[in-house]
Amino acid sequence: MKVSVLASGSRGNAILLRSGRHSLLMDCGISVRKLKIRLEQMGEELPRLEAIFVSHEHTDHTCGLEHLCEKMPAPVFATEGTWEKMSALNLDAKEKLRCGDKIKLKGFVVQAFRVPHDANEPVGFLIEAEEKKMALVTDLGSVNGLIRERLKGANLVILESNHDPELLRNGRYPWPLKQRILGKYGHLSNQDCASLLTGIQSCGLSWAVLAHLSDDNNTPELAFQTSRELLGGQVKLFLTSQKQAGPKLEI
Ligand SMILES: [Zn+2]
Ligand SMILES: [Zn+2]
């Protein structure tokens, strides 16, 4: 399975997955133009998509959906709660995603699970293909037993490492926004990300990708160091950035 992170962060998210001739897009929070530019930077072209999966309704995960589906029709999967909030979107093929169901698509198996975040029915994803398993969880305020269980056994985990709590507390954001981010339904800190990864590393984890980093309340160095210090050397660690595509991995 080939995994290309095209954008990650509060200004847009999109990840392309390929298995053989088939492709899925996970979230579409950037424009079609940007999607193409980012793919070009990675030496790829926009493939025909078997489906698009949406984690939740926030615009940094959905703003490019309508235009992309106009240009290139594909079924869009989201939970009922997410569709309630996206009812205004003009899409041809709205597919309902239920947590726990295994959706089989051209060699991929995709399963959604609930995550605590301040959206209507937000989810993370487990994706299996070519006998490999990956988890994708951005936008979550806290970690619970279900999430830990779901991530166990994943060979690759793409996980939010949003902020450093000290930088956030001392930063320029207004207090209510700081509280929202720090809260149970906000975004995950570097420390919480690192300890979740550490807890599952003995269950087959080979690659970890730190995602959805805050531009204001984090630095790539801090996010990387926090996880690197806790994780054993056998887990390869990667950073994502809002400003450029990457990493591109084959698992
Ligand atoms: Zn987001
Ligand atoms: Zn969100």
Image (spheres, rainbow, N blue to C red):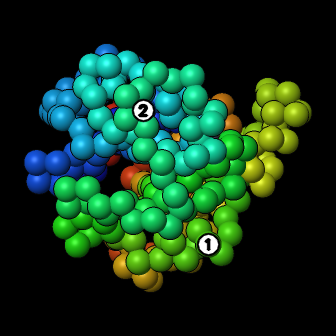
Amino acid type of the residue tagged 1 in the rendering? Leu
Relative horizontal placement of residue 166, taking residue 54 as reference (left or right): right
Q: For this rendering, which residue is in front, 114 or 186?
A: 114
The tag on residue 28 is 2
Relative horizontal placement of residue 79, taking residue 182 as reference (left or right): left
Q: Who's the residue at 89% across and 33% down the image? A: 175
Q: In the image, is residue 41 above or below residue 231?
A: above
Relative horizontal placement of residue 140, taking residue 223 as reference (left or right): right
Residue at the right extreme, as displayed: 175
Q: In the image, is residue 75 above or below residue 239?
A: above
Q: Quadrant of the N terminus?
A: bottom left
**Crowding near the residue tagged with mark 2, few <14, some 14–19, many ≥20 C-alpha atoms within 10 Å:** many
- Tag 1–tag 2 contact (CB < 8 Å): no
- Distance of label 1 from label 2 (alpha carbons): 26 Å
**Crowding near the residue tagged with mark 1, few <14, some 14–19, many ≥20 C-alpha atoms within 10 Å:** few
Q: Who's the residue at 34% across and 39% down the image? A: 75
Amino acid type of the residue tagged 2 in the rendering? Cys
Mark 1 lies within 8 Å of ligand 2 (Cβ measured): no
Is residue 229 among what the camera can see?
A: no
Secondary structure state at the residue bearing disc 2: loop
Q: For this rendering, which residue is in front, 150 or 162?
A: 150
Which is more N-terminal, label 2 or label 1?
A: 2
Q: Position of residue 196 (x, y in %)?
A: 59, 69
The tag on residue 146 is 1
Q: Position of residue 79 (x, y in %)?
A: 55, 48
Secondary structure state at the residue bearing disc 1: helix
Relative horizontal placement of residue 42, taking residue 124 as reference (left or right): left
